[in-house]
Amino acid sequence: MRGKRYQERISFVRAPGFEHMYSVGEICKMLGRSPRTVRRWFRYAPGILVILDNREKLHRRSYKTTRVPESVLRLFIELKNLC
């Protein structure tokens, strides 16, 4: 169960003045592409946020979370003429 502290962090992230960060799944739905393609497109794009979860325990794999700012996504769509 998520506590009050978690809710405070979420409201802080969505505060006015902060740019919306899209997940790979959200971009896939918008553009109709596969997650692999979207990750490849934005691999070296400036401004993306990549969060690594290094679990150095036996039998556990590491996870990587990618977030793309709205401005980077809009610029990419303009340059590629996807929509």
Image: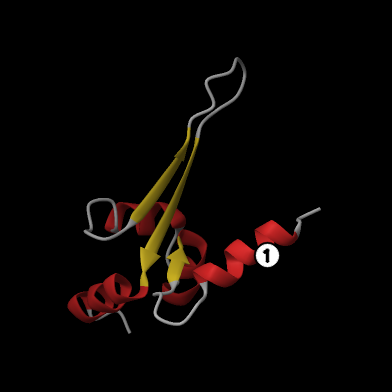
Q: Secondary structure at mark 1?
A: helix
Q: Residue at x 39, y 75 (%)?
A: 19
* Closest to the observer, 64 or 14: 14
In the rendered image, the residue lying farthest to the right is 1
Q: Which residue is mark 1?
A: 7
Q: Is residue 70 left or right of residue 13?
A: left
Q: Is residue 40 left or right of residue 62?
A: left
**Residue type, numbered disc 1:** Gln
> Where does the C terminus fall, quadrant-wise?
bottom left
In the rendered image, the residue lying farthest to the top is 58
Residue 5 versus residue 79 in the image, above or below: above
Specify the color scheme. secondary structure
**In the image, residue 22 lies at what x, y percent?**
45, 67
**In the image, residue 4 lies at what x, y percent?**
74, 61
Dot 1 surroundings within 10 Å: few (below 14), some, or many (20 or more)? few
Residue 61 versus residue 8 in the image, above or below: above
**In the image, residue 71 lies at what x, y percent?**
29, 76
Q: How many marks?
A: 1
Q: Is residue 58 left or right of residue 43?
A: right
* Closest to the observer, 31 or 18: 18
Q: Residue at x 18, y 77 (%)?
A: 79
Q: Residue at x 22, y 52 (%)?
A: 44
Q: Which image quadrant is residue 60 in?
A: top right
**In the image, residue 68 lies at what x, y percent?**
37, 64
